[in-house]
Amino acid sequence: MASSGALNLRPASPAGIDGLDGWFAALTQPSALTELAALIACALLAWLVARVVSRARRVVDDSSILFGRRIFDGVLFPLLLLFFAHVAQALLAQVLTVAVFKVAIPVLLALAVIRLGVKVLQAAFKDAPLVRALERTISWGAWMAMVLWVSGLLPVILDELDGIRWKVGGSTLSVRTMLEGTLTAGIVILITLWISSAIEARLLRSATGGELSLRKAISNATRAVLMFVGLLLALSSVGIDLTALSVLGGAIGVGVGFGLQKLAANYVSGFVMLAERSVRIGDSVRVDTFEGRITDINARYTVVRAASGRESIVPNEMFISSRVENLTLSDTRLLQFTVVSVGYDSDVELVTRLLMDAALNQARVVRDPGPSVALTNFGADGLEFTLNYWLGDPENGLQNLRSLINLAILEALRAHRIDIPYPQRVLHTPVSPVEAVKPS
């Protein structure tokens, strides 16, 4: 027998309809048109309710599980249609023998299961390679179960599977028990992922900087707790004694202490980073000679994206145990400078004003503190000026702003005919004593 906590796959017998001949005869009755009209009305009512709720919530996000980008793309429409169809079936069953709804209900249930599984997997794992394979598995499994249900073969197959039994410890398991337990575990995990995805979307909505990192930590912890609780519920529904997991927990603890200590350190370091907010999403950092902007902080690793587009996967332990330069920890502003050489006969005040104007003409340059110009060196070829300026949005690029300022400086110096000297070198040619005394 199946476990009492697992999902029961045995469908209710279609009262008053026996065999394919009975199905065909029932579907050709005039009352089938009434059922079909009721089913169409249920679909229109479900579409109307989903549309009203979607407009009230103003949801246009494709990642939304309930709504999606279109009404039919989310989970809400098939769930509403299934609910209204059940209500209509119960009402019509009091006055006539239903046949269309006996076929429609399994189809709508399969559609709701497929939509729920696909949308939850897309929201939870996004572009993971296994998502497509899991989506196809859910689709094929749901449609096959629907066909077996409608054809009446499902009870026969379940009875045969229930006869294949074996004893494990003090429990007796069968193929049917394992199948129902697997389905129950899958449903529990899907619901857990749905809840955790909804919590994550709400926590990360309109959050930036340190607040985003803290909410990311709460989201990761919530998902881990929900997945753990869901796994325990799924195992108990199959009939597995959870007290037996204490031995497994001890083995895992030994494994973590020896072979998985690096992996465990990365996970712990990830939560420490998010809790302390020593590095946050959006910070510009330099880790092990790699410089870039943090785009994501996961439980095990952190993604650092350089201005060139390269991305570095950095284990979280490095942020705790190694020296890390956070260029925007307490202040998002960064100091840049550029060095310009002009001829010694140039007007120093004019050069200073032109350099200041080149920086102030750029909207990304911070006004407080403003740019500054200093005569920093008497070079071998000319006077060397250093232009210092601050920018407040390093995530938008560093070299592009420096290039714009350098181009503006070059254009201004040429327009005022200020000399930018070429490097000059004096070449000494040794003269032999014979050539020195040779008469002219």
Image (cartoon, rainbow, N blue to C red):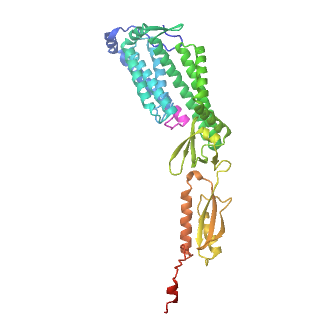
Q: Where is residue 227 shown, x and y percent of the image?
A: 57, 25
Residue 58 within the magenta-colored segment of the rendering: yes
Using the rendered view, name the quadrant where residue 240 is placed: top right
Residue numbers of the magenta segment = 51-64
Q: Where is residue 243 shown, x and y percent of the image?
A: 60, 14
Q: Answer yes or no: is residue 132 visible.
A: yes
Using the rendered view, name the quadrant where residue 89 is placed: top left
Give 189 or 150, whichever is nearer the viewer: 189
The reply, left or right, for residue 163 in relation to residue 320 is left
The reply, left or right, for residue 173 in relation to residue 398 is left
The reply, left or right, for residue 145 in relation to residue 187 is left
Image: 439 above or below 146? below
Q: Where is residue 437 shown, x and y percent of the image?
A: 52, 89
Image: 187 above or below 260? above
Image: 46 above or below 148? below
Q: Residue furthest front?
A: 434
Residue 274 within the magenta-colored segment of the rendering: no
Residue at 58% across, 46% down: 288
Q: Answer yes or no: is residue 72 visible.
A: no
Using the rendered view, name the quadrant where residue 241 is placed: top right
Image: 287 above or below 432? above
Give 47 or 337, whichever is nearer the viewer: 337
Q: Residue furthest bottom?
A: 440
Q: How many marks?
A: 0
Q: Where is residue 384 shown, x and y percent of the image?
A: 62, 70
